[in-house]
Image (spheres, helix red, strand yellow):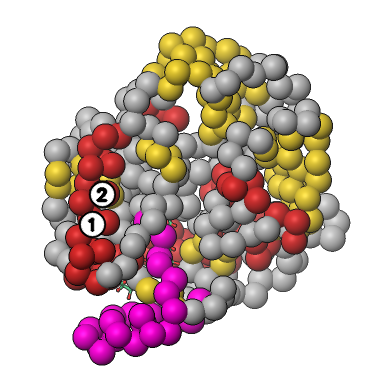
Amino acid sequence: MKVYENISLKSHNTFGIDVKARRLVVVGTDEPLPALEEPYLILGAGSDVVFTRDYPGTVVLLDPAAADAVLQADGTVVAPAGMVLDSLIQWTLERGVYGLENLSAIPGTVGASVVQNVGAYGVEAKDVVSRVEAYDLRERRTVAFSADECRFGYRTSLFKGEPGRWLIRRVHYRLAHTFEPNLTYRTLEALPHATAAELRQSITDLRWSKLPRPEEHGSAGSFFKNPVVDESVCRRLKAEYPDMPEAHAAEGGYKLSAGWLIDRAGWKGRTMGRAGVWPQNALVLYNTGGCTGAEVVTLAEAVRQDVQRRFGIGLEPEAIIV
Ligand code: EPU
């Protein structure tokens, strides 16, 4: 375990916001957690968080270098929660097990990908996760969850619903020894994908064509969730905007595209202070350089209010504001 005092979190959040934590604790996958005084925050790679001020308590991170993943004979992969998800995906392809390729290049750790139920290009974490080992900070014991018990939903899970309670230690994935590409996302069919490595490369390129490169501009990927509305709302908007994309939502109703709504409201490429709306994708807010969390929140609120006023749709952030 490593403990740091009054340390910058700039390299621990993908927005690159320069706030300090009073204490930062980095623990190994199986290391016991020290008793934590409130307030504390369990952070993955900080890929879905906006820090608006110095953190007055303890930030806990799982050591990214703590352990390697393990491949079992039936194709199950058991990965330590601190591992970077994209490194795990590369690792699985090198060992000939498939199912995670479509999540390539999503920033963040294995643990965070479960909390958020990350998804992209036709696959969500919940489709491949079979078991989660988590430490319950309230009861101070380790609990194993089946996929059903994780209560996964669109960018959410039981773990997200109880912030501060669960430290994910390990994630089990049910993967396949044969490569069957998932090409359900509308534009994937057209991409080169003969092998899993080629599909992974195509997905990575597609993702980087729509999102800022982390080494150039900080962001949290999609800032807002796609809103789910009922049929009457969808029909009303469709009558006014026939080109508006919509899809049936797994949870019932219709999923609209927050990116399209924000784009249509004219926000693409606009900046407020040092926060901006990504010129290639209106769903992404980014750090134009030296941005504060307050600037991100101010821009997000202006976007949210404008979309509410124009379309009558309330957008919710995917990112957590701290
Ligand atoms: N669109 C616009 N203008 C924009 C952005 C999008 O008109 O500026 C339109 C697109 O043309 C398309 C529709 O909106 O018709 C949807 O866009 P896209 O397919 O790119 O995906 P998205 O709904 O914007 C979601 C996820 C992404 C994921 C992609 C691909 C959410 C909040 N976002 O984005 O996930 O990579 O689908 O599967 O569900 C993330 O969560 O951080 C993330 C990047």
Q: Is residue 130 above or below residue 22?
A: below
Image-based side of 167 in relation to 240, left or right = right
User: Callout 1: few (<14), some (14-19), or many (20+) C-alpha neighbours within 10 Å?
Assistant: some
Image-based side of 284 in relation to 41, left or right = left
Could you say which is closer to the camera, residue 156 or residue 232?
Answer: 232
Magenta stretch: give its range.
224-249
> Where residue 93 sits: x, y (%)?
63, 57
Residue found at x 52% / y 71%: 122
Could you say which is closer to the camera, residue 212 or residue 307?
Answer: 307
Could you say which is closer to the camera, residue 231 or residue 303?
Answer: 231
Residue found at x 70% / y 17%: 34
Image-based side of 225 in relation to 91, left or right = left
For badge 1, the amino acid type reads Gln
For badge 2, the amino acid type reads Glu
> Where residue 209 sits: x, y (%)?
31, 60
Q: Which numbered marker is on residue 305?
A: 1
Could you say which is closer to the camera, residue 148 or residue 206?
Answer: 148
> Where residue 50 sits: x, y (%)?
37, 38
Q: Which numbered marker is on residue 301?
A: 2
Give yes or no for contact between labels 1 and 2 (Cβ–Cβ under 8 Å): yes
Q: Is residue 61 above or below residue 284?
A: above
Secondary structure under the numbered disc 1 in the rendered image: helix
Residue 178, image quadrant: bottom right
Quadrant field for ligand 1: bottom left
Say how many tags the image has: 2
Image-based side of 268 in relation to 174, left or right = left
User: Furthest residue to the right?
Assistant: 73
Q: Is residue 117 magenta?
A: no
Instruction: For the C terminus, give its image quadrant.
Output: top left
Q: Is residue 232 magenta?
A: yes
Residue found at x 68% / y 58%: 151
**Residue 71 visible here:** no
